[in-house]
Image (spheres, rainbow, N blue to C red):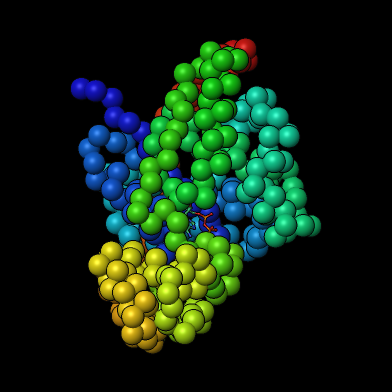
Amino acid sequence: MTKKTRVLSGIRATGRLHLGNYLGAVRGMLELQNDPRYETLYCVVDLHATTTPYDPKILKQKTRDVVLDYLSCGIDPKKSHLYIQSELADLIAQLSFYFSTVVTIARMQHLPTFKDKVKQYPEHATMALLNYPVLMAADILIYKASLIPVGIDQEPHLEVAREIARKMNDTYGTDFPEPTRFATKGEYVPSLTGVGKMSKSVPGSFINLTDDLETIKERLSHAPTDSGKGEKIPKEGGVSNLLKLVELFEGEDKRVHYEKLYTSSGIKYSELKQGLAEAIYKELKPIQEKRRELESKPEYVDEVLRQGAEKARKIAESTVNEVKEKMGFK
Ligand code: ADP
């Protein structure tokens, strides 16, 4: 039997998942878990959640929310190992330290993701934030995972993981693979504000997986539009973003339909937003029903996490031991 390719993905414990997380990451995670060629490990990265300001009193709740969202979306514990990153902090943080011996400070400081976060939280430019991509490389390489279902915003971090794999292999003779991104159709879900990507940390930018129809309509009602008519379809901004969401939830044909209207009789945005809200809700309704069911089974969820962490730990331990040996500690 040929060895299965390992897959790793994680989402930060910073709140309920939104459509960007779902389309950019979770959809890819589901596709790979259902393909027998892969062994899938999925986690909630709560250590990463501490790299920007956070509230320790509610960290556990936020972690749990992501776990429930994962399971509601269809992450199946019979097929995937599901665990919380900090349960393996002893191994992952340890490996991250070893990796930091082959990464320069300058490389980390020049990453666009680091610069953005420093701009967002100027009082919080911590070592943990600088180390974010190194910790992510440890998350991935501790399982020698080579396929990573994440959104396109994570590409610079994956580049760092590949560099670390190469440098570790060259310097210490390890055999880390160079991980690549598994892209989905929704690899970049735009913000409802018309600027940038949909993100948990930008108010008014997102629709949560737990939103009901009324909330979705309300959120879409604030998305900026224009007169509905023009010679050229806008390539960026509110209208462009709405059309992208139409494509993702109602299909390419519907988008083309609206584009034709734009250059002829005009789009009625109230109708577009109504149709879009219903299409989004149709996709979210079964996820929300599953979530309610899971909320009433905390012991089941605990057991899933315990077993997931146990499986992950076995693989992680063997990698850390190997690295320690190669680095001369043993
Ligand atoms: P956020 O940016 O909302 O804090 P995270 O940084 O925790 O989300 O990202 C979790 C996963 O969701 C990553 O794989 C990331 O690439 C993906 N993701 C986040 N926002 C989007 C988006 N707007 N479009 C596509 N994927 C996204």
Q: Quadrant of the C terminus?
A: top right
Q: Quadrant of the N terminus?
A: top left
Where 302 falls versus 212 (above or below)? above
Q: Position of residue 172 (x, y in %)?
A: 58, 14
Give the farthest residue toward the front: 231
Residue 91 versus residue 174: which sits nearer the camera?
Answer: 174
Camera-nearest residue between 89 and 289: 289
Most foreground residue, 234 or 29? 234
In this view, which residue lies farthest toward the right? 123
Up-down relation of residue 219 to residue 247 (above or below) = below
Residue 284 seen in this snapshot: no
Q: Position of residue 8 (x, y in %)?
A: 41, 40
Q: Position of residue 174 (x, y in %)?
A: 51, 17
Relative to 307, 195 lies left or right? right
Does residue 34 appear in the picture of this structure? yes
Viewer-proximal residue among 225 and 145: 225
Q: How many marks?
A: 0
Determine the residue located farthest toward the left in the rendered image.
Answer: 1
The image position of residue 76, as x and y in percent, is 29, 51
Q: Residue at x 54, y 45 (%)?
A: 86
Determine the image quadrant of residue 288: bottom left
- The relative height of residue 162 versus residue 12 in the rendered view (above or below) is above
Relative to residue 280, is residue 327 drawn left or right?
right
Q: Residue at x 44, y 48 (%)?
A: 150
Where, by quadrant of the figure, is residue 5 drawn?
A: top left
Residue appearing at x 53%, y 18% in the figure: 169
Where is 26 relative to 223, above or below?
above
